[in-house]
Amino acid sequence: MGLHIAMLSAEYPPRWGGMGSTVYHLSAALVGLGHRITVITRKGGGVAPKQDGVTVREVDWLYAPMAFTRSYGRHALNELKKLHYTNPVDIVHLHCPMISWNEKQFTDCRSTIGPIVSSLHGSWLGERDGLRIAASQKEVAVWRNPNDLAILLTAGYYAKFERAALSGSNICVANSNATKDDFTKRYNPPDNWKCEVIHWGVDIDMFYPPEHKKPSKNKQKLLAVGRLAARKGYGTLLRSFAEINSQNPETHLLIVGRGNLRKRLLKQAKKLGISQFVTIDSGMSFSKLAEEFRSADLVIYPSYYEGQGLIPLEAMASGTPVATVNHGPLPEMVDESVGTLFTMGDINSMSSSILTLLGNEDELKNMGLRGRERVLSTFTYEINAERFSEIYYSILD
């Protein structure tokens, strides 16, 4: 018999962040197993796409960095109680850290509604550490982005709500072994803490390999995707690309992402003398982005902090190798068979690793094939839904 699952997520399409995307696709896959899903998310994102078996309810929230997690959490809990009164909920599935409940709210939910599964997408303290590393690497505008500034100044305060999630949930599910280790080391959870690891999947229908990749003839295209924020490491990427381009003058770098750093990054590219080889696109459609994944020779992901990081998997699903950091959760998805790993923040390590790959087109093609196979066998939403369904039934038993 299927369950009624309430998904509480501050992001849901058309807020297509990493969390919004995973909740959207996980919901559809759970419906495919016979469950019913009600998503409780924030107002103001636009019209949510319709899915059979998925109902979306929107709530108010305070438009303020970090503080929105508390206000959204209060309104979401109230809406959850209204939902449960008319349409009883079997499982409450929270997506942390963008919802902040204290111990009293967790107890209230468990006693009046039902058991809680908390997905751990990453930690505020981890985000803060990533920003601090970005600052030490002289990434642009670390202290100028309001959201980043709020994380730097208040992550310590909001960490107490993450600690409450560990003790207040029936079970936590981390999106990587690195995230589980991060929470274990930072918060010293209780002895009876239950935490599983389920890596998020990707949309294998949108991201798929091309039938044939044309030979590059030395005009190789590098692609980097992600929000234009300091912790994504784009400043270091540009400095590394300057070295790559000096040895491969026909190489082009495309950066796709929204954010307020575009002008600063373009200015940096101009100073480095590579502006004619760098394009930054902040308004690309999903279909066009999927095409770029397929046509790229290599996807680069230089982030200083991730709970998991979906971009490498989207590249692999598209049959494109990945160059990323040998740090955090990234080696759990990427190794030398599907790409390359470099030292985080190390310009020479990044450039030399990428140049080595670009010099072997046959191996690039083989890596792309192996990457697609890995995604299909390990990183799909259907696999996610099966695992979560098992967890739901286990805590009900």
Image (cartoon, rainbow, N blue to C red):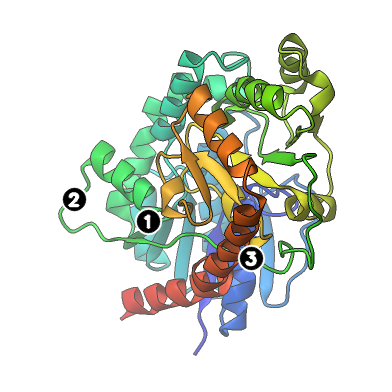
- The x and y percentages for residue 174 are 39, 55
3D distance between C-alphas at marks 1 and 3 = 29 Å
Front-most of 328 and 163? Answer: 328
Q: Is residue 103 visible?
A: no
Kind of residue sitting beneath label 3: His
Instruction: Say which residue appears at 46% left-offset and 64% top-offset.
Output: 92
Q: To which residue does mark 1 refer?
A: 108
Front-most of 271 and 290? Answer: 271
Mark with earlier residue (2, 3): 3
Q: To which residue does mark 2 refer?
A: 190
Q: Label 3 near label 1: C-beta < 8 Å?
A: no
Q: Label 2 near label 1: C-beta < 8 Å?
A: no
> Relative to 301, does residue 369 appear above or below in the rendering?
below
Most extreme residue toward the left is: 191
Q: To which residue does mark 3 refer?
A: 25
- The x and y percentages for residue 149 are 54, 19
Kind of residue sitting beneath label 1: Asp
3D distance between C-alphas at marks 2 and 3 = 32 Å
- The x and y percentages for residue 193 are 23, 57
Q: Residues within 10 Å of mark 2 (few under 14, many from 20)?
A: few
Mark with earlier residue (1, 2): 1
Kind of residue sitting beneath label 2: Pro
Q: Quadrant of residue 388?
A: bottom left
Q: Secondary structure at mark 2?
A: loop
